[in-house]
Image: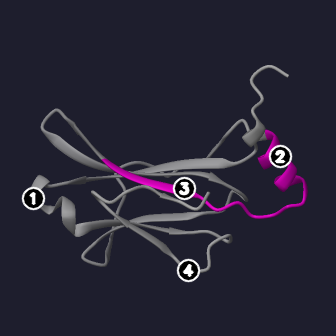
Amino acid sequence: MVGVTLSSVFYLYLLSFLIPVRPAVKVSDQKADGATKLLCQVYGFYPRDVDVNWKRDGIEVPSDEAKQVLPNTDGTYQITVTVEVLPEEMNRHSCHVEHISLDKTVIVKWGKCPHNWG
């Protein structure tokens, strides 16, 4: 099969047993037109239901865009949640992810390494 990798076959195998797949979480920043946005990319998870939020000093901050969960070709899902911030306040923000595959909420602060359960 063209375009099928061992990892996608493995994911499809896991999905056939309806085993939840833990998400990878990556936080990054993007600067454009004088604005700074923080991006929380959550990907490779199954099933689809996930809760992703930004918090500043522990208080939830509304996302700049509608949250949309998208399918991946391997049967898992992905979502990116953004928030506009002041550059001097970037380190006060953290991305919070809740998913059925996780024992507790995953919290990733801006500037930290990606969290991959892989």
Which SS class for mark 2? helix
Could you tell me the amino acid type at mark 1? Glu
Tell me whether circle 3 and circle 1 mark residues in contact (CB < 8 Å). no
Q: CA distance from mark 2 to mark 1?
A: 43 Å
Q: Is residue 50 left or right of residue 96?
A: right
Identify residue for label 4: 104
Could you tell me the amino acid type at mark 2? Leu
Give how far across and how far down residue 7 sits, in percent: 73, 42
Identify residue for label 2: 12
58 and 103: which one is in front? Answer: 103
105 and 62: which one is in front? Answer: 105
Which SS class for mark 1? helix
Could you tell me the amino acid type at mark 4? Lys
Q: CA distance from mark 4 to mark 1?
A: 29 Å
Identify residue for label 1: 88
**Image quadrant where one finds the N terminus:** top right
Give how far across and how far down residue 18 sits, in percent: 85, 61
Q: Residues within 10 Å of mark 3 (few under 14, many from 20)?
A: some
Q: Earlier in the sequence, mark 2 or mark 3?
A: 2
Report the magenta residues as a range: 9-28
Give how far across and how far down residue 29 sits, in percent: 28, 46
Could you tell me the amino acid type at mark 3? Ala
